[in-house]
Image (cartoon, grey):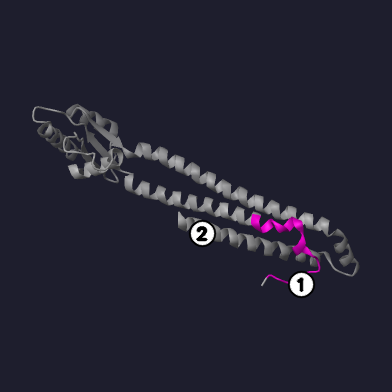
Amino acid sequence: MFRQRSDLPLEHDPSSRFLPWLIALMVYLAVLALASALTLGDAIGRWNQELTGALTVQIAPLTGADGGAAESRARRDKALALLRGTPGLVRVEPLDEERIAALLEPWLGPGNVGAGLPLPQIIDVEIAADADIDVAALSARLSTAVPGATVDDHGEWLHDLVTLARSIELAAAAAVLLIGLAAVITVVFVTRTGLAVHHQVIEMLHLIGARDSYVAKQFQFHALALGLRGGLLGLALAVITLVAI
């Protein structure tokens, strides 16, 4: 499709022999950087949707005469009553022992969460979208009523995580721009080298009536063919890499 008759032996230029491979490498890196940025952006959206407006209340386990079970349930019920009486909280759900054990297994290892291990009480809290909750005040009231209770505000660490993710996105976008700029500079360098190498042939074409536009088209189609060849190769390798990942 892009192949046409050329009066210049551009296919045999040493300067353009490695151009498709350089373009392939640049396209490969650019596609991976762009895919990483898009994946990270999608993850940020999911984190914001799932964790914004959510709190986690943790009540440290205590040991007592009966093993602490009755006292732990009483402390949990007291925290539930306080939370459910707080305006702006639309859902207050305690996690059962099975779910708490499942959360701890990745850290302690499968089978290491035994019956004798004191587990904290965990309460999942959802804040209404239009509510303005003073988390610090809520945490102070809760810790006063139930000593050992802490409130984890996901918004605080989520903000830092989103800031880091946005910085990585910007770095990936900058990498794509730099790779594109490097590709352009490479093609320009190869084209200028070809002009210098075939200077005598170009002068001869001028003598027999060839115009500058005709000579320029020779280099344009040659650079386009090499760029497409390398670009498709790099794209194919990037797709294979992403599928493998």
Q: Position of residue 48 (x, y in %)?
A: 37, 46
Q: Would you call the spot at circle 1 few (<14 residues within 10 Å), some (14-19), or many (20 or more)?
A: few
Q: Amino acid at mark 1?
A: Arg
Which residue, given by chain and number where applicable, does mark 1 sit on?
5
Q: Residue furthest front?
A: 111
Residue 48 shows in the view: yes
Q: Which residues are magenta?
A: 2-21
Q: Name the residue that disc number 2 marks.
A: 239
Relative placement, left or right, of 184 versus 57 is right
Return the residue nearer the eye: 168 or 104. 104
Could you tell me which residue is drawn at 42 percent across and 42 percent down?
162
Task: Return the x and y of residue 226 as percentages of the image width and height.
Answer: 68, 62
Q: Looking at the image, which is closer to me, 199 or 220?
A: 199
Residue found at the far right of this picture: 207
Tell me where residue 100 appears, x and y as whole percent: 22, 41
Q: Is residue 183 magenta?
A: no
Residue at image position (51%, 59%) is 239
Quarter of the view holding residue 195: bottom right
> With respect to residue 20, does 2 lie above or below?
below
- Secondary structure beneath label 1: loop
Left or right of residue 245: residue 219: right
- Density class for disc 2 (Cα within 10 Å; few <14, some 14-19, many ≥20) is some
Which tag, 2 or 1, sits closer to the chain's start? 1
In this rendering, position of residue 86 left or right of residue 11? left
Q: Is residue 3 magenta?
A: yes
Q: Quadrant of residue 69?
A: top left
The N terminus: image quadrant: bottom right
The structure residue drawn at horizontal position 53% and vertical position 50%, both measured from the top left corner, is: 33
